[in-house]
Image (cartoon, helix red, strand yellow):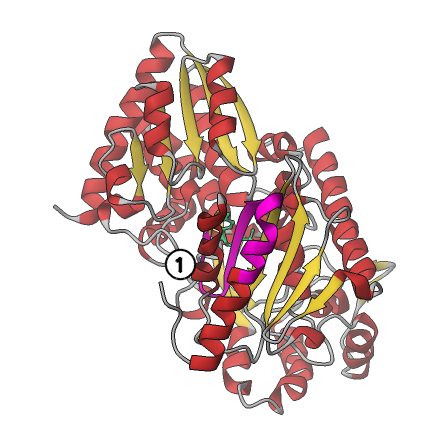
Amino acid sequence: MDRIEGLFDKAKIIGDRVLQQIREGKNILIVGHLDADGITSTSIMAKAILRKGGRFIAKITNSLRLKTLQDLKECDYDFYIFCELGAGIAMQMREMLGDRWINIDHHQIGEDEKKLDNVINSWQFDIDGSKEVSAAGMSYIIASKMDEKNIDLSWLAVVGALGDRQDQGEGRSMLGLNKIVVKDAIESGYLKVTRDLMLYGRETKPLHEAIASTIVPFISGLTGNRDACLAALTSAGIKLKEGARWRTIAELSEEEKKNVVETIIPYIASKPTATDEVKELIGDVYILEMEDEYTPLRDCREFATLLNACGRMRRGGVGISICLRDRDLALKEGEKVLAEYRSTLSRYVQTIMSDDSRLVEGRWSFMIIGDGLVDENLLGSLSSILSDIKKFEGKAFFVRTTTEDGEISFSARLTQGCNPNLNLGVIMEEAKKFDGVGGGHDVAAGSRVPSQRLNEFLEAIEDRLRQVNEDKGQNID
Ligand code: C5P
């Protein structure tokens, strides 16, 4: 059977199960992961249930562990829907919850989990969940089988996929099933996709701030340097203000955009990778036409950033309300949360960069100790920011912090100039040997271990790094 057809058939079966719960008046709990994909995935299911008159509570959380599962079971809901959570513990879900659950996900799972009727995961159909479909896309497919009117929720799945950086096609286009989702969102009149300048904050930020906030491509001399951006744009004669208001990228004419690109190119042109990086300046921009101009909701990538901030700042409910189209209180609250998220991260960076006792430099690694400072939910975001700093180039980069339940959480990133044979996902998986959990991709990964096993785990990380660096070979599984 065709891969997509197989997935659609299963989505129909799962959708029917949800409809049956609604008809029987069951109390449903939807639990979603705290990032933008988890929040949109949860919101799509919530809206589909609402439209059929169903009863549900939605909850956003950072991870699903056995203890959390036990707590949820004790809340005694009739039916549980897990969105982008629970890969690896589906067998325990079956043990604890019997048949009263479904798990919607796009993360890799083992063969035993793939066989479960209650699991709907892209990998069951050989669909690559890292770039062809997100959890929000999976929820959307189920919702569209529950009622074809739910095609108008497709824009949420576009936000989810972009939050998970699934725009991995040529010119930041979408691939596989995501393409179908994008097409549905365009046809339902919500989404417009155009090739445009890929500067961050194109709808909301003043021009110089948009350039300064752009990390991909990294524009040496301009990224992170608002004053230099302002000076460069001013000397190029680009009109920066409309009266007292700063102009945004979105309102520039084609001629002005060309001028902006020509202003940026000299900063990139000296690098050997210049041609690729100039190409990265132009790509697909995903615009929600029903949203107001100058809000962070018009550009799907900015929308995803807002949701991610809500989830990580423990305000997932605000994110869900925004997805359900509350444009009043929830949006105001969401904008406040986004500002707090940014200022918290910038406080972490400043504290860490001015306190040498928080940095341990090993032969092949940098380790930042975030204990007592860094919230575990912000660890991944912080790690991505810090690992771009020049000082940390050339070695594997780790940030760790203590968690609420007394464990140690790690986030790992490959830096510029680092040994390309390193696979951080494999290194973080070592945590499993020390009663922990861990995994991820070669360039970005994470783990958690009990605090009493910390030293053993640190030694295991060093050992792995030594093996790869001295042998100059691959990681050994
Ligand atoms: O949290 P962070 O952004 O550092 O996570 C990087 C990657 O590692 C993500 O893809 C995440 O799903 C994965 N990860 C994992 N197991 C963990 C923590 C993170 O697979 N315990």
Considering every residue shown, the one lying at the far top of the view is 24
Q: Residue at the location (31% across, 15% down)?
A: 20
Measured along the vertical axis of the image, is residue 103 above or below residue 366? Answer: above
In the image, which residues are magenta? 439-459
Q: Within the magenta stretch, is there residue 448?
A: yes
Measured along the vertical axis of the image, is residue 243 above or below residue 421? Answer: above
Q: Does the Cβ of the disc 1 residue fall within 8 Å of ligand 1?
A: no
Q: Residue at the location (47% across, 26% down)?
A: 69
Q: Within the magenta stretch, is there residue 35?
A: no
In this rendering, the count of numbered labels is: 1
Horizontal and vertical percent position of residue 469: 49, 78
Q: Residue at the location (32% across, 45% down)?
A: 109
- Amino acid marked by disc 1: Met
Horizontal and vertical percent position of residue 117: 24, 29
Look at mark 1 in the image and give the residue it sits on: 174
| Residue 251 falls in image quadrant | bottom right
Measured along the vertical axis of the image, is residue 461 above or below residue 159? Answer: below
